[in-house]
């Protein structure tokens, strides 16, 4: 696993933090730690999409469960995650100890710990990054800050980082209390694409 382009040792001790929240109404996969929920069905959709695609970007990794499951399934493919992390588990940002615990054994996971807009903007202006990654991304999963403004910017930047024939997946478009359910239809209108809804949990947008 790499954090901000620095490889960490597989045997690194995990800092304390991110205590378990009240027992969630779902089961954390065996061998993983965390409290987030990405349905097994959505993970299986990613696994299917990755059969013909090589680079995956996850904006908003939280505890790193989903990306670790995908990276284990495809050790020959590259997985990138962005999250504004914290250690105490009290807010909505990702939790570094959980992400390390779930991904420390993986050589194909790259984590960047900053605001998603900063990281993606830097990538777009960095020719070396484009060369090092042999292009950009084939799948971009948007699950970061769910406010109207931040989710729209994440979608716009993520779309710019997406290869031709790539696919963007937007999570939580069914939750009317958060901004992303309003920005997703607006974004689709801006780019002239339709979103394929996914069991009320999110949607797929093919480039």
Image (cartoon, rainbow, N blue to C red):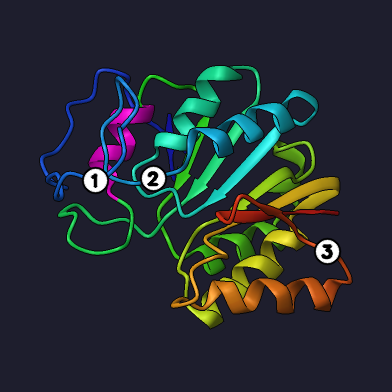
For marks 2 and 1 on the same chain, the one whose residue lies earlier in the sequence = 1
Q: Residue at x 51, y 63 (%)?
A: 116
Which quarter of the figure is the N terminus placed in?
top left
Is 204 on the left or on the right of 101, as rendered?
Answer: right
Which residue is denoted by mark 3 in the rendering?
194
| Residue 47 visible in the current orientation | yes
Residue nearest the viewer, comparing 39 with 94? 39
State the mark number for residue 37: 2
Which quarter of the figure is the C terminus placed in?
bottom right
x, y percentage for residue 98? Answer: 27, 38
Q: Mark 1 and mark 3: span between their CA atoms? A: 33 Å
Q: Mark 2 and mark 1: span between their CA atoms? A: 9 Å
Q: Residue at x 70, y 27 (%)?
A: 48
Which residue is denoted by mark 1 in the rendering?
24
79 over 203 or under it: above or below: above
Q: Secondary structure at mark 3?
A: loop
193 over 48 or under it: above or below: below
Q: Secondary structure at mark 2?
A: loop
**Pointers 1 and 3 in contact (C-beta within 8 Å):** no
Q: Mark 2, residues whose alpha carbon is within 10 Å: few (<14), some, or many (≥20)? A: some
Q: Secondary structure at mark 1?
A: loop
Q: Mark 3 and mark 2: span between their CA atoms? A: 25 Å
For marks 3 and 2 on the same chain, the one whose residue lies earlier in the sequence = 2
Residue nearest the viewer, comparing 112 with 92? 92
x, y percentage for residue 78? Answer: 62, 30
**Pointers 2 and 1 in contact (C-beta within 8 Å):** yes
Is 201 on the left or on the right of 121, as rendered?
Answer: left
Is 182 on the left or on the right of 16, as rendered?
Answer: right
- The answer to if 100 sits in the magenta stretch is yes
- Magenta-colored span: 95-103
Residue nearest the viewer, comparing 67 with 48? 48
């Amino acid at each position: 696993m790499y954090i901000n382009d620095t490889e960490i040792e597989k045997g690194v001790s995990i800092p304390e933090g991110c205590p378990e929240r009240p027992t969630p109404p779902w089961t954390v996969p065996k061998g993983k730690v965390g409290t987030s929920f990405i349905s097994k069905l959505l993970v299986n959709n990613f696994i299917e999409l990755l059969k013909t695609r090589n680079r995956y970007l996850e904006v908003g990794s939280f505890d790193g469960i989903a990306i670790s499951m995908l990276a284990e399934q495809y050790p020959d493919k590259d997985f990138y995650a962005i999250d504004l992390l914290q250690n105490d588990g009290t807010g909505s940002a990702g939790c570094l100890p959980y992400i390390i615990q779930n991904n420390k054994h993986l050589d194909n996971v790259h984590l960047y710990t900053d605001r998603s807009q900063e990281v993606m903007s830097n990538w777009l202006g960095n020719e070396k990054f484009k060369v090092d990654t042999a292009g950009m991304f084939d799948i971009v999963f948007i699950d970061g800050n769910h406010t109207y403004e931040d989710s729209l910017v994440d979608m716009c930047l993520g779309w710019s980082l997406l290869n031709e024939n790539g696919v963007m997946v937007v999570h939580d478009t069914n939750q009317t209390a958060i901004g992303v359910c309003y920005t997703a239809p607006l974004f689709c209108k801006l780019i002239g694409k339709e979103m394929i809804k996914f069991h009320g949990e999110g949607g797929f947008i093919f480039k």
